[in-house]
Image: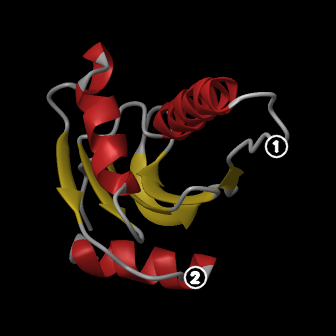
């Protein structure tokens, strides 16, 4: 078992499932964190207002996810589409995470348990 502080997550536009092997102080075994849901706003008056709201909500969503990754030394990110790349760019633009080792992958929807198993397998646990 690794004493490195590792984390992995599956995310799409609306939900993120985070798995990590550490709390604030200790590295131990992998566990699931509570899934995070993205805020989605509907019915904005203009396309511009809708786009601004979408960007603000995405930044808030990414910030909530990154909060769970605090103190991680290595992160594995998977999910459908391009959101993993956007999240990686967000992390590398954040001072606290700019040197974080991030591995990207793609995967269709997974159950929380499948995410847990995929992350464990990725890190050889």
Q: Where in the figure is residue 1, as x and y percent of width and height? A: 27, 68
- Does any portion of residue 30 appear in the rendered image? yes
Q: Nearer the viewer, residue 12 or 111?
A: 12
Given this view, does label 2 or label 1 mark the residue nearer the observer?
A: 1
Mark 2, residue position: 113
User: Could you classify mark 2 by the number of other residues whose Cα lies within 10 Å: few (under 14), some (14-19), or many (20 or more)?
Assistant: few
CA distance for labels 2 and 1 = 31 Å
User: Could you classify mark 1 by the number of other residues whose Cα lies within 10 Å: few (under 14), some (14-19), or many (20 or more)?
Assistant: few
User: Which residue is situated farthest in the top direction here?
Assistant: 95
Position of 122 relative to 114 (above/below):
above
Q: Nearer the viewer, residue 53 or 121?
A: 53
Q: Nearer the viewer, residue 75 or 89?
A: 89
Position of 46 relative to 61 (above/below):
above
Mark 1, residue position: 42
Q: Secondary structure at mark 1?
A: loop
Q: Nearer the viewer, residue 111 or 122?
A: 111
User: Which residue is situated farthest in the front direction here?
Assistant: 46
Q: Residue at x 60, y 24 (%)?
A: 52
């Amino acid at each position: 078992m690794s004493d490195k502080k590792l984390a992995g997550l599956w995310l799409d536009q609306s939900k993120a499932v985070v798995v990590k092997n550490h709390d604030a102080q200790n590295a131990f075994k992998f566990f699931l964190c509570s899934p995070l849901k993205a805020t989605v706003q509907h019915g904005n008056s203009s396309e511009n207002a809708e786009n601004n709201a979408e960007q603000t909500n995405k930044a808030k969503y990414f910030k909530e996810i990154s909060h769970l990754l605090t103190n991680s030394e290595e992160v594995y990110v998977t999910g459908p589409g391009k959101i993993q790349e956007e999240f990686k760019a967000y992390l590398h633009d954040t001072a606290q995470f700019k040197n974080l080792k991030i591995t990207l992958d793609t995967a269709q929807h997974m159950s929380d348990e499948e995410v847990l198993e995929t992350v464990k397998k990725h890190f050889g646990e």
